[in-house]
Amino acid sequence: MKSQPEKLKQLVREKYSSIAQQKKDQHVSSCCGSCGCSDEVTQIMNDDYSTLEGYQPEADLGLGCGLPTRFAKIQKGDVVIDLGSGAGNDCFVARHETGDTGKVIGIDFTPAMIEKARENAQKLGFENVEFILGDIEQMPVDDEIADVVISNCVLNLVPDKQKVFSEIYRVLKPGGHFSISDIVLEGELPEAIRHSAEMYAGCISGAIQKETYLEWIRQQGFQQIMIQQQKQIHIPEDILRREAGETGWQLYQQSGAGIWSITVYAEKPAQHTCGCGGCA
């Protein structure tokens, strides 16, 4: 029998496999393309990539909640890892910044997404962009190989977020940094919303409290932590009523809870440290 984390991963994998086989306008809705019941919900989380150099429309599935590559301070020749790389959207923008002398590695645990991303890279003739099938809780890459790690609306879907931050620390070179866009909460969501499987695949019920999110980053040993961008997410009423029912909707209205998209930046110290309190 599968554990609860494995069940959640399977739910997300199935959802994204379906999305990978669709056209963007068939699934774009909320973050992660999870719901299609309201005209208002179209791209309520996804930011506009079209102004960024290196943008490739065929790789943009409208699944993000920010623009981490805009804030990631990528330099020519950098090695960049994108967590939950999807069809390759952020990887191709990052590749424009690294140039021919750098390298971009996309990691995704959905085979259909990896296949789609590889097809896109082949069409574009990019030889320094690689897509690897793997779980970001256990990245299939060596220690200290990346100058920059990016991710767009993915960590909220992962059951063990602390493990992901540990893996980010492991794969970054000393002095490297990350820029991650994600969904966080302020206040408590009603249980009916938080426990909805569809809302989980839509990046909401898997989100954690903003302060907890930032504290886990600090505990791992990262420094210079800052929020580079923040915006509140407003979920259309019809989706919330459908997912939580009338009672859940009313409780949500009364709770004052907020759903936020944030882009967080942090650096790995140039000299090795860790958050365990026991290192010399």
Image: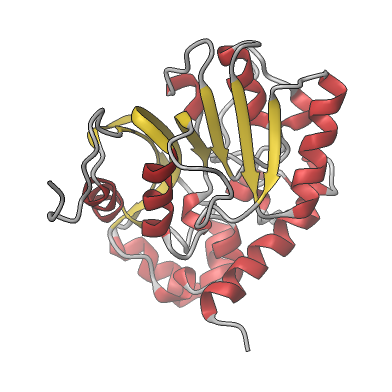
- Taking the spot 48% from the left edge, 51% from the top edge, the residue there is 155
Please provide percent x and percent y for residue 208.
36, 59
Judged left or right of residue 244, residue 261 is: left
Q: Is residue 197 above or below residue 31?
A: below
Q: Is residue 113 above or below residue 200?
A: above
Furthest toward the front, the residue is 280
Please provide percent x and percent y for residue 38.
66, 51
Q: Is residue 67 visible?
A: yes
Please provide percent x and percent y for residue 88.
69, 33
Q: Is residue 229 visible?
A: no
- Taking the spot 75% from the left edge, 24% from the top edge, the residue there is 57
Judged left or right of residue 150, residue 39 is: right
Q: Out of 229 and 237, give the one closest to the viewer.
A: 229
Q: Out of 107 and 64, give the one closest to the viewer.
A: 107
Q: Is residue 9 above or below residue 43?
A: below
- Taking the spot 82% from the left edge, 44% from the top edge, the residue there is 115
| Visual colour scheme | secondary structure
* Number of dots carrying numbers: 0
Please provide percent x and percent y for residue 51.
61, 13
Q: Is the N terminus in the top left, top right, bottom left or bottom right quadrant?
A: bottom right
- Taking the spot 43% from the left edge, 53% from the top edge, the residue there is 164
Q: Out of 122 and 30, give the one closest to the viewer.
A: 122
Judged left or right of residue 53, residue 124 is: right
